[in-house]
Image (cartoon, helix red, strand yellow):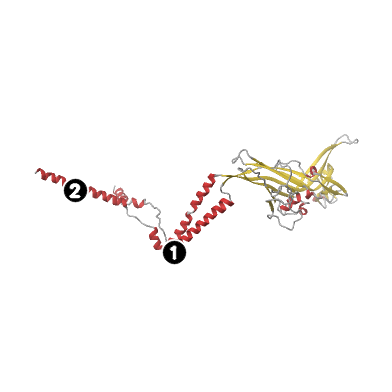
């Protein structure tokens, strides 16, 4: 019991008014130009940040939604090749392989064609040898024999080789950089306006890129990528002046990605083509996307793009009762375009405006905190300023208790006097 009594005495000695003291702000006018200039300078900075960056540059008065859209392409153009002195024309059907591909487009610039291949055992140009032991023994695919410096293997014969096979035709597509691609797109922002669709698919005529194809000495708008904010000024090539272009040649796309057609025509390349939308859904005018181009195969060890496909057929001869399987093998090298459509939809929002204004008001306290810190901890007069800034009040709750005790004593004294006076009157 003595322990609990001791704890009780200690607890009863604690002043709860001191423990749960309340801190409030006291409005004091400090006559010091240094503090005033600092406070107003910070307030002006916050106002400039809110108006200039948040509202004007970042459009903080809008509600925004990010969305993905769709891309449709239209390819136009014709090229030709010379192989062993024979000319051949290549149209869009020939150079675009496959004809339909989701989210991508491939345009060939160089083709290897090996016709009439048959299954059999023949030399493989990709596997050089000096003796039989240099060849892999893996029946029935490989017999481990070396002939004419190459290993014999079961494969489609003759094997395709650009330099060693008389049956492989190499086609360098002359003028493939002039093949043009028309990009169309569509996008919607359902959380802002579920009924409105922004689309350029129904455009009647393209807007060609007015840049110079041979301006390779000039750097692209961005190193490694090209973003096109607007079109040219030629009224014939640019039907609607000021609108961004949506039709490019293959050479122009490669140049915008920071490369040259001559450097990639034999190896191919992979480009990212993105339609970027920036639309106000509460405006009646059309929203036209800009196009950004970036090269993706930047590794010096593994770059370019190769696409292989074959046409299979079966032939029969009068000397044989069994049909023979044959194929024509094509190896395409060219430009692969990975297509995407992304954008942001915007709508003026009262709630967004109120949120930014509330943030601005909250940030204004930074000016007061900085001025208080300078006044209380940095300036030489900090001790004098602290006496005005920080003030300790008396404990009015204890004073009220003492007043109540005094009033109680006075009441008791009056009652005693009244009783004493009553006794005197009786006597």
- Residue 418 drawn at (x, y percent): 16, 45
Q: In what element is the residue under mark 2?
A: helix
User: Is residue 261 shown left or right of residue 60?
Assistant: right
- Counting other residues with Cα less than 10 Å from the Cα at mark 1, is it few (<14), some (14-19), or many (20 or more)? few
Give the CA separation, mark 2 to mark 1.
58 Å
Task: Give me the residue at 24% from left, 48% from top.
Answer: 407
Q: Residue furthest front?
A: 235
- According to the picture, the residue beneath numbered tag 2 turns out to be 413
Quadrant of residue 329 within the rendered picture = top right
Q: Is residue 356 visible?
A: yes
How many numbered circles are shown?
2
Task: Give me the residue at 29% from left, 52% from top.
Answer: 399
Q: Quadrant of the C terminus?
A: top left
Q: In what element is the residue under mark 1?
A: loop
User: Is residue 359 shown left or right of residue 346?
Assistant: left
Q: Residue furthest left?
A: 427
Along the line of sight, which residue is nearer the eye, 62 or 178? Answer: 62
Q: Earlier in the sequence, mark 2 or mark 1?
A: 1
- Residue 386 drawn at (x, y percent): 40, 60
User: Is residue 37 shown left or right of residue 85?
Assistant: left
- According to the picture, the residue beneath numbered tag 1 turns out to be 379
Q: Residue furthest right?
A: 319
Along the line of sight, which residue is nearer the eye, 174 or 34? Answer: 34
User: Is residue 404 shown left or right of residue 251?
Assistant: left
Quadrant of residue 341 within the rendered picture = top right
């Amino acid at each position: 019991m003595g322990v609990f009594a001791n704890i009780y005495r200690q607890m009863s000695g604690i002043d709860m008014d001191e423990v749960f003291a309340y801190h409030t702000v006291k409005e004091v006018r400090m006559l010091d130009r240094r503090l005033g200039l600092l406070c107003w300078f910070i307030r002006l900075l916050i106002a400039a940040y809110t108006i200039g960056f948040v509202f004007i540059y970042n459009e903080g008065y809008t509600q925004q939604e990010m969305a993905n859209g769709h891309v449709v392409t239209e390819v136009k153009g014709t090229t030709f090749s010379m192989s062993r002195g024979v000319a051949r024309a290549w149209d869009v059907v020939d150079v675009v392989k496959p004809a339909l591909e989701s989210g991508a487009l491939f345009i060939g610039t160089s083709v290897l064609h090996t016709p009439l291949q048959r299954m059999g055992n023949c030399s493989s140009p990709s596997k050089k040898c000096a003796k039989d032991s240099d060849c892999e023994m893996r029946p029935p695919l490989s017999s481990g024999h070396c002939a004419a410096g190459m290993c014999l293997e079961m494969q489609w014969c003759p094997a395709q080789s650009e330099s060693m096979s008389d049956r492989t035709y190499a086609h360098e597509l002359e003028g493939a950089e002039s093949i043009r691609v028309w990009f169309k797109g569509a996008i919607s922002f359902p959380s802002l306006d579920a009924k409105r669709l922004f689309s350029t698919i129904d455009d009647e005529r393209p807007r060609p890129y007015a840049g110079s194809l041979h301006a390779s000495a000039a750097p692209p708008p961005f190193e490694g990528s090209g973003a096109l904010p607007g079109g040219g000024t030629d009224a014939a090539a640019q039907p609607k002046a000021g609108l961004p272009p949506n039709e490019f040649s293959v050479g122009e796309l490669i140049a915008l990605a920071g490369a040259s057609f001559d450097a990639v025509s034999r190896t191919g390349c992979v480009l990212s083509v993105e339609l970027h939308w920036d639309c106000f859904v509460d405006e009646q005018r059309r929203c036209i996307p800009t196009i950004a181009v970036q090269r993706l195969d930047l590794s010096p060890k593994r770059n370019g793009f190769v696409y292989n496909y074959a046409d299979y057929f079966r032939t029969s001869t009068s000397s044989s009762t069994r049909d023979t399987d044959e194929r024509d093998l094509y190896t395409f090298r060219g430009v692969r375009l990975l297509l995407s459509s992304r954008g942001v939809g915007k709508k003026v929002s009262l709630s967004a405006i109120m949120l930014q204004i509330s943030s601005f008001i909250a940030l204004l306290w930074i000016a007061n905190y900085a001025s208080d810190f300078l006044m209380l901890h940095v300036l030489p007069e900090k001790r004098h300023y602290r006496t005005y800034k920080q003030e300790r009040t008396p404990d009015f709750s204890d004073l009220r208790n003492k007043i109540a005790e005094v009033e109680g004593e006075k009441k008791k004294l009056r009652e005693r006097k009244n009783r004493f006076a009553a006794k005197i009157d009786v006597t």
